[in-house]
Each structure stands twice: as C-alpha cells, then as structure tokens.
Image (cartoon, coloured by chain):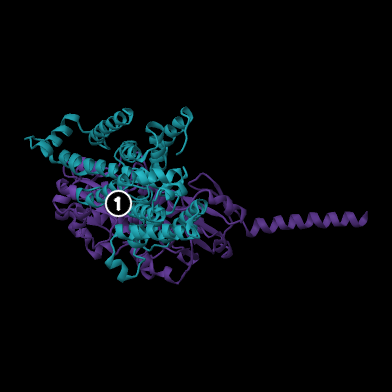
Chain colours: A cyan, B purple
Amino acid sequence: MKRPWLVGLGLGAALFGTVGVAVSVGSTAIGWTNVYEVLGRHLLGLETDVSPTVDRIVWQLRLPRAVLAGIVGGGLSIVGVAMQTLVRNPLAEPYILGISSGASAGASLFYLGFLPPLLSETLTMPVAAFLGGLASISLVYLVAQDGPRVSVARLLLAGVAMSALMGSLTSFITFSSPEPDKLRAVLFWLLGSLNGARWIELPIPALATGLGLICLLGLARPLDAMLVGEEPAQSLGMPVEALKKGIIVLAALVTGTLVAVSGAIGFVGLIVPHAVRLLAGVPHRRLVPLSFLSGAIFLCWADIAARTILPAQELPVGILTALCGVPFFLALLRRRNYRFG
Amino acid sequence: MVLHRSALALAVLLVVGACGTSNSDRSDTVGTDDLGRTVEIAPPIERTISLAPNLTELIYAAGAGSTLVAVTSSDDYPPAVDSLDRVSALPIDFEAVATKSPDLVLATDQINPPGDTETFEALDVPIYFFSFDSLDDVFDALRTTGSLIGTEARARDSAQALERQLSALRARTDSLSSEERPRVLVLIGDDTLYSFGAGSYIHELVEVAGGRSITASIETKAPTLSEEFVLTEKPDVIVGAWGSNYDSDRLLELHPTWDVVPAVRNGRGYGLPSNLLLRPGPRLLQGARRMAAHLHPDRFGDLDRPSVRADSPISSPSAKTTAVER
C-alpha cells in the first residue's frame, strides 16, 4: 500500500505551498521578496528592513489567517468524516445534523446580548457556540433514539428539521436585535468569515481540532467496524452506543469551537471526506489524516479567493466554499465509480 | 328605444360631468422621480408618509411636516416625529401604509426596494423615489419635496440656506492645499469595516470638510474593506458613524495591526453621530462642519460649537423662518 503515503506526502507538500501562496497574495499587492523577508525575519531571525506595514500585513494578518483556515477546514472535514461514518450516510455533515446551526444560534444569542446576564457573564462565545451545538445535536439524538438503538433515518430527518429551526432562531435573534453595529458584524460572521484572525485566537480552535484529530485517529478501527454495520461491530465486542455518544460530543465540541471563531462555513465537511475516499479509500487510519490535510488546503484556497476577488475588500469565505468546491466535486463524482463505505 | 337613448344621454352627461369635476378640483400633477418613473399625484397633498428617516427630515425642512401622517420606526428627528404613527419600512408594511390612505409616499432607493413600486401602484398609492449620490441631490430633493407637497417657497428658502452654509464652509476649506488635506477614511462599522465606495455623497462631504476620502475609487457602492487596505492606504484620520462619545482606543483593540496607521498612532479616530453622516438630509452640513473641526482643529475648531451647530433649518420649528434667513 504505497499510494496512501504518496497521497499524504503530496497533500502535505501542497498544504505547505498553499500557505506560501496565502501569505503572498491578498487584497493589496506586496512583492514576493518582501513577503519572504518578513517570514525570514520572524522564523529565522534574519535582519531585514521591510516596512512595518508589510510586516504587519504578512505576519499579523495573512499568516494567522491562513493557519486558521487550515485549522477550520481540517477540523470541519474530520467532523464530516465522523458524522458520515456515525450515520452511515454520505449526506451527513455537521451542518445537516444541526450542530453548525445550533452553534450559530448559541453564538448569536450570546453576541447580541439576548442571554440572561448571569449566563452571559459566565460564558464566552466559543462556549456558547459549543453549548448551542451540543443542545441541538442532543435533541436530534434523543428524537432519533428508537429503543436502545439510534435510527439513522430519524437522525438525518431530525437533524435537517433542527437545522431549519436553529436557522430561524438565529434569523429571529438577528432581526430583532436593537444594535445595528453588532447586527452587521453578526451577519458577516454568520456567512462564515476568517476575517480578523489573530495569533492569540488560534490556540483554542487548534486545541479543539487537534483533540478531534487524535481521538478519531485513535478510534480508526472502531470507526471502520461501524461502517460495516452496528451489529457486526457489536459482535466484535465494541461498545457501539458509547462510541456513538462519544463521537457526537466530540463533533459538537470541534464544530462549536470552530463556528465560534469563523461562523458557519458550510460544505467543507460534506465534500472533502468524499473526495478523499475517492482518492485514497475508506479505512479511517488514512481517511482521517488525509481529510484533515485536504480540508485545510481547500479552505485556504477558498479564503485566498475571498481575499482577492474584490480589490481592497473582504468577502465572507462561506460564500465561496460551495462556489470553489462544487465543480471539482461534481467532476470527481462523474469521473470515478464512487462507492461509500 | 326611448329609454335606451335617454339612458345613453344620461351616461354621457355623467361622464362629462365627472371629467369636469376632475379637471377643476383634481388637477393631477405628473412628475418623474429618480427611478425615472412617472408619478401622478393629485393636489392638495394633505397626507404624506415618509419611508426613510432622511426623507422625514427633508419633509420638515421643506415646511411640510404638518402633512406627515406616519414615519418609519427608525425615525427620531426632529422631536415632532415622536407624536406620529409608525410604519415598518424594512420590510415594508404595505397594509399599514395603505390604511393611512396617503396622498403621497416618499421613498429612497437607499433603503426601500424599488420593486415595491408595483405593489404601491396596484394599491393606488402614489410613491415617489429619491436617489442621493451627491450633496446637490439632497438640495434638489428638498426643492422637489416642496413642489410635490405644495410648499415650494419654504422648501426653496431652506435649500438656499443649506447651500449658503455649504458655500460658507467651502469658502473656508477651499484655501487648503492638497498637502494640507488629511487622507480620511470614513467607516460605518468599527469591527466589520463597512464603508462608502464610488458614487457616494460622503466623499464630497469629506472634501468640503477639508480632507480627501481614500475610498472614493472603490467600485463597489457599499464595500467591506480589508484590514490590509487600511494598512497600505495609511489614512491620517478615521471618521466613523459611531457617536460623539466614541473612544478611539477601541480601533486599536479591534485591529491590533493598525498601530502603524497614522490615524491610530496619532489618536485621530473620531466618532460622529451616525445620523449626521448616514442620513442624506438637511443635517449633513452639521456633519460636514463637525468633521471639519476634527480634521483641522487649529483652523476650524470653532465649527464644532453648538451656536454654529444649532442653525439647522429644522431644529426649531417655531423659529423656522428666522433660522432659514440667517
């Protein structure tokens, strides 16, 4: 099995190159030499005489933003992998099961000040988003529970319905908000944006995504078994119900944290795992890390597009994920004989 | 047959009679609004509705405030609007507007969707749309409002008073050389960087106040600027619609990389009341004067004093004429 390693190496190199491009282009034109002088100064301690403006643009705006794009894209993709395996359905992604929309609703409630003072003082926005996502997926899960087991069809239906409900809740909150300034900020954020990423904001999402990555890698074999079916997995002695619950909490944790920093960026979690299955096969020990890399690369490019399409301006990256991803995805689907699981 | 003929004669009489009354009492006026639509109104105009706060201010400045039967839920000026009924403008509450049976509804494509005109036409409610792309558009709209509602003289006086204020300010700032004019960034939000692109009146306002707007060449009308743009353009002053009590330290809190931007480094981020910047109406000149005072505190600091600020033609309804004549 040499190919997966090649794919992995290729993706790793591509991610490196992508970050290189991401710091070199943006809404303003900066020469390549200047960009790499800045990187050389910060990474290698070289002496350079780049203007402080260029230094800030490259080191404080573009690089943390590219890193955040990688963390968010990778995190959403592995959550997508976990959700698709959990429900054994290729349609599953954080958005469809109501986690993203629940997290959006939680974050909007918090940000626009609609929570009781006691709650809003003890919570932070990531925690509010996590709780929103967890509440939403828990409700979906409870509805889907059929005796001791979880019905996949009900899970999907309840998830779609919950998404719609949380979406209206968010719209209602934003629409009835008395503060126009915050409202504008929330609208931009709801469309999904990596704007304003700073180094100090990165550790929490990085931690959440890292935790998700490690846990899912550790669970690679049980996840493979789940894909075959719950009964075979159970007969192999796996605690299937505990595994399901664990995956749901993990998905809510990662998605909630990521939604809190970047808004609801759809579509990454849906298409990236499928694209990776097409390229490298189904086993999770490959699928999870490769999805992480591909998701990171994909969102980086979508964000590069968001920063460069309109000169001097910002576009919410959530608008572009589908725009960039769908043509590629449809072409892949058409070209290969795709089988899920 | 006889019956038929007399019925016909009666019908003809009725039609002619109807035409006669229509010609004498309801001499319909036809105008072309800023969307290029033909708007028919039937004077006297006694019941008007404003669908945007700046239009309300223009109606009062045109001396037609007494015709207003409803304003939007966002209206807060002049104080007389407090006693008026409110209708929702965004989204438009067609029923509430139609129920008030207005003779004329004023709208602006800044806020109201031009597609709504069809529904208003079906409801037989005359609606007139304004566009505001320059300061002249504001003065023109003031005069048009007056002639639509029938207070031409008052509207003309108010418009002239505003134009005099504009030329008075221009006379003071015209002497500035282009090096003396700071590069100004006007923002609507301080967190998400909503701003004004090409074709906005705001650039003229900045120019009159003695500055140069750095977003005038951005093609999008309502751009969301990137932080990089601000860093590379290096504005000398940042003016925002954030209220007079704005603490400019917040800019650095929200955008830590801006410590190299001259406006932030020199503490030259200023908030102005949003209604003086974002409402293309009679109070824009107040906004321009206060901006001038911020841009050139040494030369035009006096423009920020209340005595100069209180001369808006609509600030004191009882002393309107005197205020206008000043």
**Which residue is located at x 24 percent, y 42 percent?**
A67
Report the front residue among B129 and B160: B129
Taking the image as shown, residue A38 lies to the left or right of residue B286, namely: left
Q: Position of residue B173 (x, y in %)?
A: 22, 48
Q: Position of residue B212 (x, y in %)?
A: 24, 44
- Chain ID, mark 1: A
Dot 1: element? helix
Q: Position of residue A37 (x, y in %)?
A: 13, 33
Mark 1 burial class by Cα count in 10 Å: few <14, some 14-19, many 20+: many
Report the front residue among B159 and B68: B68
**Which residue is located at x 65 percent, y 58 percent?**
B24
**In terms of image quadrants, where is residue B103?**
bottom right
Report the front residue among B233 and A13: A13
Q: Position of residue B75 (x, y in %)?
A: 41, 63
Report the front residue among A240 and A255: A240
Q: Which residue is mark 1?
A: A261
Q: Is residue A54 above or below residue B146?
A: above
From this viewpoint, is residue B218 visible?
no
